[in-house]
Image (cartoon, helix red, strand yellow):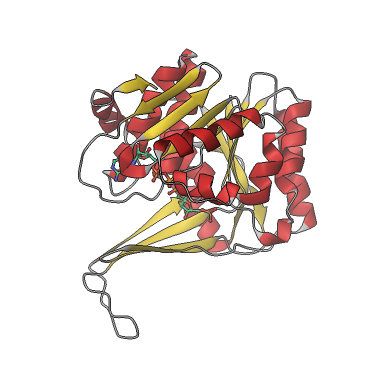
Amino acid sequence: MIYTVTLNPSIDYIVEVEDLTLGGLNRMQRDLKLPGGKGINVSRVLNQLGVRNTATGFLGGFTGRYIGQWLDEEQISSDFVTVAEDTRINIKLKAAEETEINGTGPVIREEEAEALLAKLEALQAGDILVLSGSAPPSLGGSFYSRLIAECKSKKAEFVIDTTGQALKDALAQEPLLVKPNHHELAELFGVSIGSRDEIITYGRRLMESGARYVLVSMAGEGALFISDQGVYYANAPKGQVKNSVGAGDSMIAGFVGTLSLTGDVLEAFRTGVASGSATAFSDDLADRALIGQLKNQIQIEQL
Ligand SMILES: Nc1ncnc2c1ncn2[C@@H]1O[C@H](COP(=O)(O)OP(=O)(O)O)[C@@H](O)[C@H]1O
Ligand SMILES: O=P(O)(O)OC[C@H]1O[C@](O)(COP(=O)(O)O)[C@@H](O)[C@@H]1O
């Protein structure tokens, strides 16, 4: 079974404005309110791929209920801890450029945090726990470490998609997969990265630090896959980009879901890239039909 954990879900409020005037009145051309937060996105795309999973984390208030109802309507199994404060709303402003304003998230009380840890007692050997996104600041810096310790004590595997110290701490615990984009990779090592060779150098360091598989996504430039069996590049399919929010989460879902179904890492890589691109080419997240179509446009090359 795959479990996704979203410590800081969001309603992604996607707002389109033709010509943005800062400091003036702008009228929206279109808006969309989607359930968001990285683990929730992973669960929704896993569901499209027919991979059984349960979404957990913290949800609260009217915003939390909106997300919970959406997941129920999509028949996604969920088991969230209900928290006292409202789940955040993240703004994704689409004008000439895409601007994102993400909230910090609700205060999580100690008993709410403990309730989430208690849910992980259900984990078993063979399960995969996908830990994705930021943690609300009230949880403190080491909450992911506590979740990982619980996961390891049950002999389950984990995937982590977060940034900064939480990611660095997690590497030593041997994640199944990490998936920074190339900007996050550079930030993690405090360097600027200008070439594919440099991405490979720093991606390999993540593997040497403990990750079994490393995916480095590069938006429209495709992705690199690094494991102890070699380094592979996949092109991104071409298409009209509609909304790239959640592309990285979709890639994780495509990879982990396919790996769990087939055990074939290169097929998992191909499906991951197709899932990321299918999301970039959709208003909402990727659907199964588009993922299938795009897979045919992806060539994988060993470097
Ligand atoms: N503009 C795009 N064109 C085609 N595919 C894209 C585009 N943006 C994202 N993707 C796909 O989604 C994957 C993840 O996107 P990326 O933007 O790198 O991740 P993140 O959302 O984590 O920043 C890419 O490797 C690619 O397959
Ligand atoms: O937890 P964070 O880092 O604030 O990110 C949350 C945001 O990330 C998303 O999950 C999208 O992530 P990606 O575009 O990186 O796949 C949004 O749905 C959400 O608003």
Determine which quarter of the picture holds residue 148.
Answer: top right
Note whether 282 is above or below 95 in the view shown.
above
Q: Residue at x 68, y 28 (%)?
A: 174
In this rendered view, identify the residue nearer to me: 195 or 249: 195
Total numbered labels placed on residues in the image? 0
In this rendered view, identify the residue nearer to me: 153 or 71: 153
Q: In the drawing, does residue 127 fall left or right of residue 262?
A: right
Asked if residue 157 shows in the view, the reply is yes
Residue 209: x %, y % from top left? 66, 32
Q: In the drawing, does residue 269 fall left or right of residue 58?
A: left
Asked if residue 75 shows in the view, the reply is no
Residue 28: x %, y % from top left? 26, 71
Residue 171: x %, y % from top left? 67, 35
Q: In the drawing, does residue 196 fall left or right of residue 188?
A: left
Residue 109: x %, y % from top left? 75, 59
Determine which quarter of the picture holds residue 121.
Answer: top right
Note whether 76 is above or below 115 in the view shown.
above
Q: Which residue is drawn at 58% across and 24% down?
A: 1
Q: Which residue is drawn at 60% across and 33% down?
A: 205
